[in-house]
Amino acid sequence: MDQNALKKAVAEAALAYIKPKLSSDSIVGVGTGSTANFFIDALAALRDDFKAAVASSEATAARLKSHGIEVIDLNEAGECEVYVDGADESNAHLHLIKGGGAALTREKIVTAASREFICIADQSKWVETLGAFPLPVEVIPMARSYVARQIVKLGGDPVYREGVVTDNGNIILDVYNFDIPDPVATEHALNSIVGVVTNGLFAARPADVLLLGTENGVETIFAK
Ligand code: 5RP
């Protein structure tokens, strides 16, 4: 099965997973990326089963609206019943690396404001130790060089993601060759650097459940 077929399978599994949880008052938080896009397309079938969606990016908001799904501001929504999003890597604790699509900050905010975080990913994202995927860090533009120097002191190799401006008007540093034995500690260390908006480690608040698309079907994995 190709990667897109696995992404589509997990998106459909997520739809089945959330369906019993939804009511006419429910707000659904929706992530960003190609796997999330398959979920958005599937979610259109449940359009009348929930109140509205909160989007983690402008691209996701546009796709939701194209399906006639109402998109509301998180400040208006309060808490989301569920948040469904992809990931670049997941370990067995459901600590994630996210932000390949540069939407990490809004993704982390919607995660924080959601009762349950359902991660959807194909099997290529499953890792023993996080860090082979370069870790995205969103940075205030004027702090770029300062933050890069601090990240080098922490042992990583930051690379400026050329030509990318986040929905929040900031830049992304992708950190290569980063040893991440303790994802919660690394998440906090990066967030303590002045000028960092957020980083792509979702470890302090990991996913609650991972729907992992494999050649043998979709596995439902809870955190160890
Ligand atoms: C965007 C993300 C995505 O969830 C992550 O990059 C995975 O993307 P895809 O589903 O396209 O493989 O964090 O910021």
Image: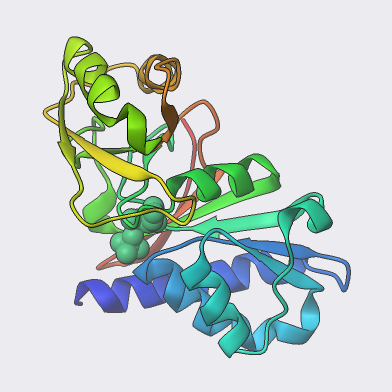
Q: Is residue 188 visible?
A: yes
Residue at image location 55% in from the left, 53% down from the top: 118
Residue at the extreme right: 25
Q: Does 149 sit left or right of 103 as displayed? A: left
Give the quadrant of residue 145. top left
Ligand 1: image quarter? bottom left
- The relative height of residue 5 versus residue 214 in the rendered view (above or below) is below
Question: Residue 185, position in %: x, y?
Answer: 40, 14
- The relative height of residue 129 versus residue 190 in the rendered view (above or below) is below
Residue at the extreme top: 153
Q: Which quadrant does the N terminus fall into?
A: bottom left
- The relative height of residue 172 versus residue 65 in the rendered view (above or below) is above
Q: Say which of 145 and 99 sits in front.
A: 145
Residue at image location 28% in from the left, 55% down from the top: 164
Q: Does 47 sit left or right of 34 as displayed? A: right
Residue at image location 76% in from the left, 63% down from the top: 27
- The relative height of residue 131 versus residue 152 in the rendered view (above or below) is below
Q: How is the image coloured?
A: rainbow
Q: Say which of 77 and 18 sits in front.
A: 77
Count of numbered circles in the view = 0
Residue at the extreme front: 142
Question: Residue 67, position in %: x, y?
Answer: 60, 89
Q: Does 178 sit left or right of 221 as displayed? A: left
Question: Residue 2, position in %: x, y?
Answer: 19, 76
Q: Is residue 213 visible?
A: no
Residue at image location 81% in from the left, 50% down from the top: 78
Give the quadrant of residue 211. bottom left
Q: Does 128 sit left or right of 204 as displayed? A: left
Q: Say which of 72 and 215 sits in front.
A: 72
Question: Residue 213, position in %: x, y?
Answer: 34, 64
